[in-house]
Amino acid sequence: MRIVFMGTPAAAAKILQALVDAKQEIIAVVTQPDRPQGRGLKVYFSPVKELALQYNLPLLQPEKVKEPIFVAELCALKPDLIIVVAYGQILSGQVLEMPKYGCINVHASLLPKYRGASPIEYAILKGEKETGISIMRVQVSLDTGPVLLQDKLPISAIDTTGSLESKLFEIAVPLTLKAIKLIEQGKAEFIKQDESKASYASRIRKEEGVVDWKKSAMQIDAMVRAFDPWPGAYTYYNKKSLKICRADRADRADKVFKAGEIVEIVKNEGFKVATGDGILMVLEVQAEAGKRMNAYDFVMGHKLQVGEVLPN
């Protein structure tokens, strides 16, 4: 089967590696254009591009997938199947109709829940006990296509978006290979999504990482985990940002504190902060332009005091 693979981040590269290992016929790899990143604006290749170069796979990097030149290039390849994994652009109807067997997408949620760009983050933010991988047929409307396969995965109380993504794409590998086999054998049965159960996970913005201490300890703990590795959950101390890298809910207080108030310093561990409902134990932090560190070490270095109030 002649396959065009479309993807960009490390999670997508896992699937591409599996296709290569399985000796699938990859006739082209499509990934986002190279972008400057970081303070030095150094240009980095996407993980998918790096892998494609490693295996000398034909590579396409259109600025926009609707560009006539790119569409013509894709058409000339005569793909049987297009596989999309976190590519980063919405495909046109013209592209979707091109392959003999259509276009499938590997999506990190149990559709119809959490359609959109940030399904893993939302699953953690909303306190879900499980999530999973869905393989669906791509339609012009976002993540609405019928589902071929799904596999579930429990979400632990310490999972971050980073750790959960890694586990999800481990189960995505065999699921993708199974989907290809079913399509090749003519046994693929796509089931329409239940629109009454649909929800949307919009793209996370950096400013959403600011901690509102009036929220509950449970909500802030979920936020810390959901926004790790990006954009991070952060507050401010001495007018500089302070990222909270790891936290846990502590015992409830026996008195009333202000939301954001430092209520206890715990030796060798960190510091406790009052929230709108409960106490949050901060265990690891990262100061502005600094490195991730134990929260107690931060306390000692910055003379954080009980009674100080972090801004809301």
Image: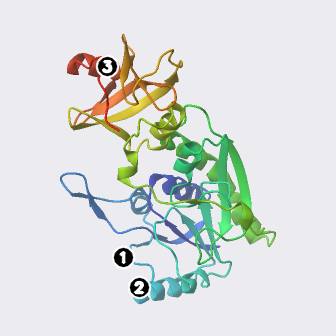
**Residue 243 visible somewhere in the drawing:** yes
Of discs 1 and 3, which sits in the foreground?
3
Q: Is residue 216 left or right of residue 303?
A: right
Residue 29 position, x and y percent, is: 47, 69
Q: Is residue 224 left or right of residue 78?
A: left
| Lower position in the chain sequence, tag 1 or tag 3 | 1
How many callouts does the rendering have?
3
The kind of residue tagged 1 is Glu
**Which mark is drawn over residue 307?**
3
| Lower position in the chain sequence, tag 3 or tag 2 | 2
Which residue lies under the disc numbered 2? Answer: 67
- Please give the name of the residue rendered at 31% of the width and 27% of the height, measured from the top-left corner: 309
Q: Is residue 300 left or right of residue 142?
A: left
Which of the image's four quarters has the C terminus?
Answer: top left
**Which mark is drawn over residue 20?**
none
Placement of 142 over or under 120, stated as above or below: below
Q: Residues within 10 Å of mark 2 (few under 14, many from 20)?
A: few
Of discs 3 and 2, which sits in the foreground?
3
- Please give the name of the residue rendered at 65% of the width and 77% of the height, measured from the top-left corner: 102
Alpha carbon of mark 3 to alpha carbon of mark 2: how far?
A: 58 Å
Q: Is 312 or 144 nearer to us in this picture?
A: 312
Q: Is residue 217 left or right of residue 182?
A: left
The kind of residue tagged 2 is Glu
Asked whether the beta carbons under mark 3 and mark 2 sit within 8 Å of each other, the answer is no
Asked whether the beta carbons under mark 1 and mark 2 sit within 8 Å of each other, the answer is yes
Residue 146 position, x and y percent, is: 72, 69
- Please give the name of the residue rendered at 51% of the width and 34% of the height, measured from the top-left corner: 216
The kind of residue tagged 3 is Gly
Placement of 147 over or under 158, stated as above or below: below
**Which mark is drawn over residue 63?**
1
Is label 1 in a helix, a strand or a loop?
Answer: loop
Is label 3 in a helix, a strand or a loop?
Answer: loop
